[in-house]
Image: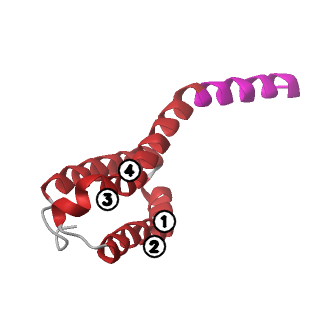
């Protein structure tokens, strides 16, 4: 295979990956954004009152929520390499859904 053919195959592969993977990853980033910002919208719009949260308790809950992202980022990337992107991203999305579902039953600061 000469250089021109190799470059053509590379471009074709990159185009296929881009069309298949980029929309899915963009959707995941959008869901991630919604998930991260949901607590900031929920607090002042009734969650604090419903759960009886003070401003300090809300701040602690939001801070702990973001600490989880920071602390688990490196182990998650290591697991991604070990298990493969398809399995690991699917596991993340399913877990995300389960945790989001469980948040519907939060009724106090302890549950949050």
Q: Earlier in the sequence, mark 4 or mark 3?
A: 4
**Which residue position is annotated with label 2?**
71
Q: Is residue 7 magenta?
A: yes
CA separation, marks 1 and 2?
A: 6 Å
State the SS at label 3: helix
State the SS at label 2: helix
- Percent from the top left, x then y, of residue 11? 74, 26
Most common SS among magenta residues: helix
Question: Residue at image x 66%, y 25%?
Answer: 15
Question: Residue at image x 12%, y 56%?
Answer: 105
Q: Nearer the viewer, mark 1 or mark 4?
A: 4
**Which residue position is annotated with label 3?**
43
**Which residue position is annotated with label 1?**
73
Classed neighbour count for the residue bearing mark 4: other residues with Cα under 10 Å, few (<14), some (14–19), many (≥20): few
Q: Earlier in the sequence, mark 3 or mark 2?
A: 3
Question: Residue at image x 46%, y 60%?
Answer: 82
Above or below, 94 relative to 55: above
What are the residue bounds of the magenta stretch? 1-18
Q: Earlier in the sequence, mark 4 or mark 2?
A: 4
Q: Nearer the viewer, mark 4 or mark 3?
A: 3
- Percent from the top left, x then y, of residue 86? 42, 43
- Percent from the top left, x then y, of residue 77? 50, 61
Camera-side residue: 52 or 78? 52
CA separation, marks 4 and 3?
A: 14 Å
Q: Nearer the viewer, mark 4 or mark 2?
A: 4
Given the current orientation, which residue lies at the most extreme right position?
3
Q: Are marks 1 and 2 in contact (CB under 8 Å)?
A: yes
**Which residue position is annotated with label 4?**
35
Q: Nearer the viewer, mark 3 or mark 2?
A: 3
């Amino acid at each position: 295979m000469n250089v021109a053919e190799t470059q053509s195959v590379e471009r074709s592969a990159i185009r296929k990956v881009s069309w298949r993977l980029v929309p899915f990853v963009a959707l995941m980033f959008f869901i991630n954004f919604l998930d991260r910002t949901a607590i900031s919208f929920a607090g002042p719009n009734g969650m604090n009152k419903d759960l009886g949260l003070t401003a300090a308790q809300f701040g602690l809950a939001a801070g702990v929520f973001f600490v989880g992202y920071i602390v688990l980022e490196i182990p998650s990337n290591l697991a991604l390499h070990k298990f493969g992107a398809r399995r690991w991203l699917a596991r993340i999305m399913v877990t995300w859904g389960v945790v989001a579902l469980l948040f519907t039953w939060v009724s106090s600061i302890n549950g949050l």
